[in-house]
Image (cartoon, rainbow, N blue to C red):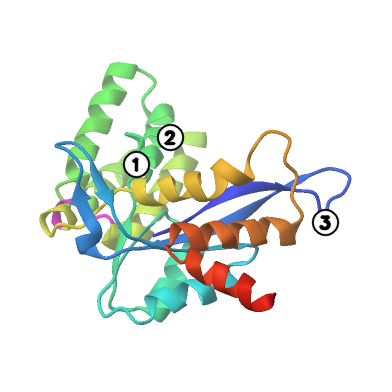
Amino acid sequence: MMDGGMVLTREESWPAPRWKELKVGRVFAADALLPENEHRNFIHNSGYVAHLGECEPFFDKLSLLTDPLPNMVWIADGARWIWRWVAEQYPGAVQILDRPATRYFHAKEKLCEFAQLAFPEEPTRKEWIQKQEDLLFEDQVALVIANVSLMSLKGQPKDKQQALLKYYQNNEHRMRYGTFREQGYLIGSEPIEAAIRHLIQQRLKLSGQRWTIAGAQQVANLRVAEKSGQWQKVVQLIEHSG
């Protein structure tokens, strides 16, 4: 899984601070997912990477964890830079457009934005959205695309319609949620959202913090080592440097 969180920096745009994305990757084995209770699971072992800046150095770090793996399932949002890299580096991997922890998973979020303009009356809008959502979870993405494309619209709803159709067409093979669940794959993004919280937000987004680029990256590196169970390597480096 991969996603990003924003860190407030004080370089490059001084005196005004600037938000920059700190990209985070989380890698774990299927058998690392264990039941905590009837409604919740937990992951007992993960490897992490983090990079503040462009995607290529981030991918270089992430590939050190992923290259040795024989079989992979990638879960991410609709960002093209992510899927372009996955397709180039791991063409046989399963690709899943993630469902965030909120009830508005990315595919539905786009649907709701369109429906707000296409259906002014709330009862009609809710009923239509529910029907399309049910189809999405039955692997009927093509039928949802057809339902949307057959609607005759003008103005802003027409623009939203075209954007929704393009989004679904680009991600159709990543939205087979019925099949993915039957095969036992995760479809939710809760693990990477949790990683963003405990790697970034709990340390790098405290009140009043403004980071240099190097400082934010160094702290992120330490947190990656600790959360990945590699803290002893940090201790050994410190001991050897002395």
Label pair 2/3, CB-CB below 8 angstroms: no
Q: Is residue 42 magenta?
A: no
Which residue is found at the position 56% from the left and 43% from the top? 201
**Residue 74 vs residue 4: left or right?**
left
Quarter of the image for the N terminus: give it: bottom left
**Residue 239 vs residue 9: left or right?**
left
Q: Quadrant of residue 105?
A: top left
Q: Quadrant of residue 222?
A: bottom right
Question: What is the distance, in whole Å, between disc 1 and disc 3 at their CAs?
Answer: 35 Å
Q: How many marks?
A: 3
The mark lying in front, picked from 2 and 3, is 3
* Residue designated by label 2: 113
Question: What is the distance, in whole Å, between disc 2 and disc 3 at their CAs?
Answer: 35 Å
| Residue range corresponding to the magenta coloring | 175-179
* Residue designated by label 1: 105
* Residue designated by label 3: 12
